[in-house]
Amino acid sequence: MNLKHNIEITPRIGCSNICEYCPQSTLIKRYRERIGSDKDTMMSLETFKKCLSTIPKDIGINFTGYVEPFLNPDTAEMILHANERGYSILLNTTLVGLKKDDWMKIRNIHFRELHIHLPSFSYEEMIGVKIPVEIYEHNGKKIKRLSEDYYDMLNFIIQNPGNGWGEYKNDYHCLGDLHPELHDLRNHFYVGEREINSRAMNILLEKKGKVPDEINIRGNCSRVYQNVLLPDGSLSLCCQDYGLDEIMGNLLENTWEEYINSEHVVEVRKNGSDLCDYCEEGLDYRDDESWQAWRRPGQLSYIMSFTLVTALYDINRENDGDGRKFSEYLSWFKETLKIPTSMVVYVDPSLVDFVSENRKGLPTKIESQKLEEIPYYFLKNNIENIINSSDYKEKISDPKRLECINSLYNIVIFSKFQWVKKSIEENYFNSDIFLWLDAGLSRLFYEIPLTNPYPSVNALDAFKSNKNKVIIQTSMSYYPNLVNANGCSEEYFWDNRSWVMAGLWGGYKKPMIKFCDLIDDTLQNKMISGRMVNNEQIAMAYVYKNNPDLFLAYENVATMHRDYEFIQELSK
């Protein structure tokens, strides 16, 4: 069958490969802005089938959109369905997210083209990279070691090739030079080296001037016919439109005939789009000077500079505490997990699948620990003896607070410091900066898009300027006598006036480890040894006041109690 043109499939938004030549942060941000923050970011099989049902058979279906297709667990079923319906299929995959069982389901399909995108030596990527990240030097350049899981999958594909075209059935290629650990492949297969471009300047933080008239291809490019199907059924202009500047229509709302005959589609296919004025199709960006002029500065290194650490445990707070439901925390946690920054997540084994599903495609290390395995669980009996004693109940301020009645609450809120310390020591993503982020803090992000990289580029500069500090937020308005005091005695442990926020704090590795150790000393050698316990905010304030040189305090002067202005500040 002669194909008129093709449709590219983007089955999810957000890609864990974080290639520096691919503007994922732009895609994530603009999808929320242009399509809607409430729209699906993972295409359902049902949506795919409905959209496909209106597309004619002479339109090729290309699983090579804005992300690695197998980061959607239903992609293999989508490919099978398209094949059963008689469509011509192209697949381009890095193998990331692909399961062996799924490959065996689809390998015998007669693909029009079947491309295996291999890791690059030239550019920063996370394709096939070992977690924790291991860095070594090769020919004077730092490079990330590939994982055994990646080798295993690649060997499986080689031993069980798909049914593509050409001598080898699978087309192997990379962008720039091939990763040195894969050089032996060239003894057995042809490995193509492809070029890159700026994706119509979407790789830039801001678009530069338009492409000169003599090389401007507006109105003369076939890619206006190769639209990209998004998870909610919308169609963007083409493979260059990562900023979703030109949304052409929606196949859940229109038939194919209605779509191609719409006034907007007819106009764009005839005269092009404003985005076309920025498209450098055919220009060469391979030399260092040109690429450095156009590349997004350190997209991967920026995202990997930070590691967010978080955790969630069910302590039966609803019945044994303040009545807050765990289901509420799960809903907040789900939103928190959308942040595309590298993340270490500590959860009970029962929540591993929940985290995996909501972090799929994002750089994540899930640490599965049962409640009785978390760092300070060994203090449970000591804490219960303390909070049940009459002396404690008489002396502690506001003895009905959660930390005064639920030992598990104290165990979890203090364990965050040891989780952060362990994450720093393991350093799964080779990060410089670590932040603790409470699992439910998404509810206080307000208008900040959770799908943006967080903290911002400007925040990164603030951390770089304070490498020997832990950055915290202090509330200045409520307890000025405590805030302005020269020091803090252990008598404060019995207080209920918290003025250092514990939900978000961070810094470089060395000061963060020192901070976590000081909290450990405060908890075990001062609080517990002194037959008392209080929340981590009290402990943080004590450590801050007695070690002021270790901290940079973001001073919150808001009048709304516990307003996290610090959250907003790190997003600017």
Image (cartoon, rainbow, N blue to C red):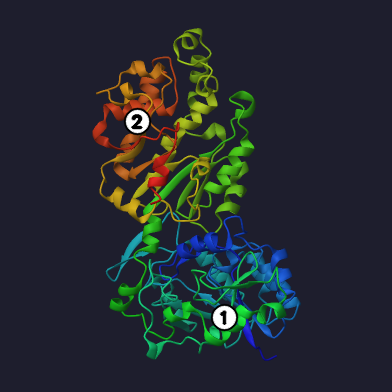
Query: On the rendered structure, is 354 left or right of 510?
Result: right
| Residue situated furthest front in the rendering | 263
Residue 67 appears at what percent x and percent y?
54, 68
Residue corresponding to mark 2: 476
Q: Which one is closest to the eye, mark 2 or mark 1? A: 2
Q: Secondary structure at mark 1?
A: loop
x, y percent for residue 464: 28, 50
- Quadrant of the rendered image containing residue 72: bottom right
User: Label 2 to label 1, Cα distance in Å?
Assistant: 63 Å
Please, what is the three-letter code of the amino acid marked with disc 1? Asn
The secondary structure type at the circle numbered 2 is loop
Query: Relative to 361, does residue 172 appear above or below in the rendering?
Result: below
User: Which amino acid, by three-letter code, is at mark 2?
Assistant: Met
Q: Is residue 347 visible?
A: yes
Residue annotated with mark 1: 170
Q: Residue at x 27, y 69 (%)?
A: 140
Q: Residue at x 47, y 47 (%)?
A: 344
434 on left or right of 466: right
